[in-house]
Image (cartoon, grey):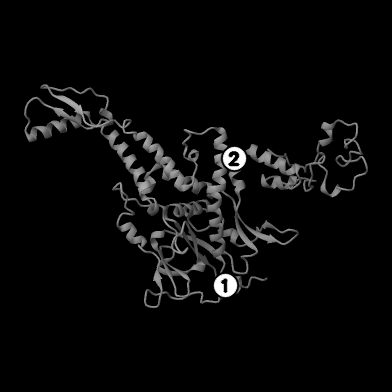
Amino acid sequence: MFPFGRFFGRTVPAEPRRIEPTITRDGSYSLAWPTPQLFGLFGGSGSNTGIPVTPISALQAPAVYACVRCLGEDISKLPVTVQRYVNEGEGYWKADRDHPLNNVLQIPNRWQTWFEFLRYMVTALELRGNAIAIVKRDWAGMPVELIPVNWDRVSVLLSPQGLLFYNVSHPQIGWGVTFSQDDVIHARGITVDGGYLGMTPVAAAADAFGLSIALQQHGAVLFRQGAQLRGIIKHPGKLTTEGAKRLAETWQGQYGGVQNSSKTAILEEGMDFEALTMTSEDAQFLESRAFQILDIARMFRVPPHKLFDLSKANFATVELAEQAYVNDSLHPRVVNLEAAFARALFFEDERLGYRINFNFRGLLRGDLKSRSDAYGSALNNGWLNINTTRAWEDLPPIKGGDVYRVPANTLPLDMLGKQQPGQTGAPGAGGKGGVGSDADPAQSTATQPVEQESGDQGVA
């Protein structure tokens, strides 16, 4: 079907594509309760530790920062392409390099690369539960720019017809500008309100974030005071209030702080020092901090080894955990992003025939051995040819590289059933090397050499 929407605007839906939403009287109402502005005004979500937790303050916990950074960078480094469905045989997806969306998927806006844009979207999704980007279009309705918007600058409205509208303030867009859901990329986290808004992890797990920050602050205060616990100084005589205050200040000035932690204290006039509290080790301070790493990693569904906690890891468990990380952590998030991008970027008549694809081969870019093993298995089993694997390695095609081979002596697929009796080897073998021949069995599985084009040096 010819995409008329590209030249004459998008197809008009059954319901009005845009209405001007109002509040309360006609049934439209804001879904942002409490509003993000009020959320930030009161210092974020309260926790039982007494420490207010916001998406920014949560990053003070090293485990939170590590989880968010790990997820953002691992997803952002995946190659992204527009794919078109080809209805041949069983059907398959093929990269469409000529689709106009490829431009915006390389340079989304004037100040960000695709890596930076996607990393921001993942970071917003993990910390705020919602990632928002406004789609700017040309005269034909084709997306030309993606503007990421801070969730604190967005108010979401639900119209009586069930449509979502986004009131947005942004320097590149304007202040208080309303967009329909068709022009907004909205990736949501866990939802509990009918699927309209994602729940922020900061509000859902404020105590866990607050406890991690509190433990870190407690350790920092200990070192600031020289890792010395508070105690009392006993004086055999009677001190005035001013004298006691001066003595405490002198003691703290001489023996407090990290740089003074190794000094030897000198007590005069028969004074004695007595500690009042336990040490941090006795209170299992370090164990508590280690548990918080696991607790936060559990919330983000990130294995501990990605946070460099290898206390209970070995090679076998790390290898399995890495695969579980791809399957259980990255894959659901990628599917969520792919669907959110496709809904906002494709025209209605394109959605069944096109998709946005994040290619997980990008995770093996620095692992040549794993790629080589996978290529060897694919080539020997006939579902990839040499030129396809060379293209994945950014190498030019070679002559004869489009032939597919199978395990039976690497016989080309088009020769199956055509060999003469006793001639089951590779083409040109003349019956030698086949099953039942007197040839060396080890040589019967050898592949035929493939001629290279001039100037090609092969796989590096």
Horizontal arrangement in the rendering, residue 397 relative to residue 207 (left or right):
right
In this rendering, the answer to whether 383 lies above or below 457 is below
**Residue under the image location 25 percent in, 33 percent down:** 225
Return the disc, 1 or 2, that comes first in the chain's sequence: 1
**Is the residue marked by circle 2 packed among few (<14), some (14-19), or many (20+) residues within 10 Å?**
few
Say which residue label 2 marks.
366
Say which residue label 1 marks.
10
**Residue under the image location 81 percent in, 36 percent down:** 446
In this rendering, the answer to whether 349 lies above or below 383 is below
Q: Amino acid at mark 1?
A: Arg
**Residue under the image location 32 percent in, 36 percent down:** 219
SS at circle 1: loop
On the question of residue 68 being in view, the answer is: no
Q: Give residue 198's position: percent from left, percent from top.
A: 45, 59
Q: Amino acid at mark 2?
A: Gly
Q: Nearer the viewer, residue 386 or 106?
A: 386
Label 1 to label 2, Cα distance in Å? 42 Å
Q: Give residue 451's position: percent from left, percent from top.
A: 80, 41
Q: Give residue 89's position: percent from left, percent from top.
A: 76, 59
Q: Nearer the viewer, residue 354 or 27?
A: 27
